[in-house]
């Protein structure tokens, strides 16, 4: 081998060594970052160049890398361009409003969405739990009757009224963002069926909010909805399917009459290690999973997209807050990112 050939061979070895060293350092950095945030370090994108454009099936299977949800099948676009696209869709509709209906998780998603729109949101209306019909929706309340309380309900000491459950953070709220370009609200409908909120026409919370408020008074361009964390101790899976079927049928009327785009969020998993002991066998992952199975049956029946936030909240990811029910703040913007993918798809 001549001198020139030896020089070329040596240069090639140096380049290959440098590339291998950079790859090792990059791998170590990702692994260290994962370990420092208590997430798994085995995330491998099947095609990193692909954006998640095919909906929930591509976005719900993945892992947390630091504060970012990383689907296995694709790469989620950044939050800002997604919510700007969602904003354009909402502004172009007849009803520029995004409604998130559910329990305190809905409140946290509404807060994350308002923050994503630059925090330039004004609070227009704040409800009062169990008086939401009048205080928030402007609907005269109907007769009160004692709330059905299942035997499994072990946390009743803070109930303010016999017809009302003490759900902290379930009050309805409406914000106006970007100088009125879009309105964002969460509705306190934490059970698939309850009689907490009534009117002269309806004695069920879901009917008051979905029919008298959303359908007749203030239809949204987008409805993201869920119940489950409260239902899990109040009903059987079979009863839950019937109740969610009714809830979904009301949402479908919104879609048919007002073009509302729908998205159901599966009920999240708690972290039993952080929960109060009395709740561990009630709001357990096993019981919640049984309810989520029933939702899939209903969603297929009505062609409602589903985002599997149950999979995104596996306790092994270490993303829950100190109480084990809600997640840390970074979780909610990531749910909005995944939700936007589904909501912005062409509707069938």
Image (tube, grey):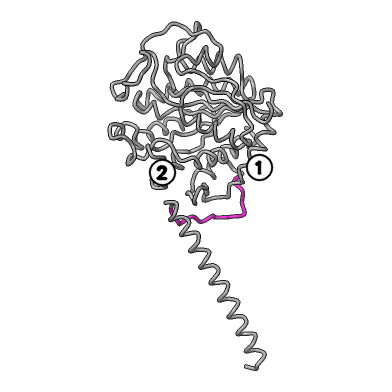
Residue drawn at x 53%, y 44% is: 59
Residue appearing at x 58%, y 47% in the figure = 76
* Residue sitting at the far right: 92
Mark 1 vs mark 2: in front? 1
The image shows residue 327 at horizontal and vertical percentages of: 44, 39
Q: How many marks?
A: 2
Residue sitting nearer the eye, 36 or 103: 36
Res 348 → quadrant: top right
Tell me which secondary structure the magenta stretch mostly adopts: loop
Q: Quadrant location of the N terminus?
A: bottom right
- In the image: residue 78, left or right of residue 295: right
Residue 259 is labelled as: none
Q: Residue at x 61, y 20 (%)?
A: 219
Residue 83, position in %: x, y?
63, 37
Query: Does the magenta-highlighted stretch encompass residue 43?
Result: yes
Looking at the rendered structure, the secondary structure element under dot 2 is loop
Which residue was labeled with disc 2?
A: 314
How far apart are the two marked residues, 1 and 2, measured between alpha carbons? 28 Å
User: Picture quarter containing residue 305?
Assistant: top right
Pick whichever of labels 1 and 2 is earlier in the sequence: 1
Tag 1 residue: 81
Q: Which residues are magenta?
A: 40-52
């Amino acid at each position: 081998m001549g001198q020139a050939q030896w020089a070329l061979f040596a240069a090639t070895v140096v380049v290959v060594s440098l590339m291998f060293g950079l790859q090792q350092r990059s791998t170590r950095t990702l692994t260290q970052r994962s370990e420092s945030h208590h997430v798994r370090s085995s995330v491998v994108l099947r095609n990193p160049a692909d954006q998640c454009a095919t909906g929930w099936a591509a976005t719900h299977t993945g892992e947390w890398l630091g504060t970012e949800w990383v689907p296995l099948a694709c790469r989620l676009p950044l939050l800002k361009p997604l919510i700007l696209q969602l904003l354009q869709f909402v502004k172009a509709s007849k009803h520029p409003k995004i409604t998130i209906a559910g329990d305190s998780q809905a409140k946290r998603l509404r807060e994350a969405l308002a923050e994503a729109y630059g925090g330039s949101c004004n609070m227009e209306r704040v409800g009062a739990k169990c008086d939401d019909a009048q205080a928030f929706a402007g609907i005269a309340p109907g007769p009160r009757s004692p709330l059905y309380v299942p035997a499994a309900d072990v946390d009743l000491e803070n109930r303010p009224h016999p017809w009302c459950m003490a759900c902290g953070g379930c009050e309805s709220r409406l914000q106006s963002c970007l100088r009125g370009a879009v309105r964002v609200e969460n509705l306190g409908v934490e059970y698939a069926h309850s009689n907490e909120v009534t009117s002269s026409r309806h004695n069920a919370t879901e009917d008051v909010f979905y029919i008298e408020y959303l359908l007749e008074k203030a239809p949204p361009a987008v409805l993201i909805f869920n119940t489950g964390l409260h239902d899990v101790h109040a009903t059987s899976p079979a009863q839950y399917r019937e109740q969610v079927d009714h809830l979904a049928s009301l949402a479908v009327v919104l879609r048919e009459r007002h073009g509302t785009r729908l998205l159901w969020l599966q009920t999240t998993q708690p972290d039993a290690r952080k929960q109060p002991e009395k709740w561990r066998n009630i709001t357990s992952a096993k019981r919640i999973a049984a309810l989520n199975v029933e939702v899939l049956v209903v969603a297929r029946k009505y062609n409602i997209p589903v985002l599997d936030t149950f999979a995104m909240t596996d306790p092994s990811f270490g993303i829950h807050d100190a109480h084990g029910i809600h997640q840390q703040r970074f979780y909610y913007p990531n749910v909005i990112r995944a939700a936007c993918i589904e909501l912005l798809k062409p509707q069938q």
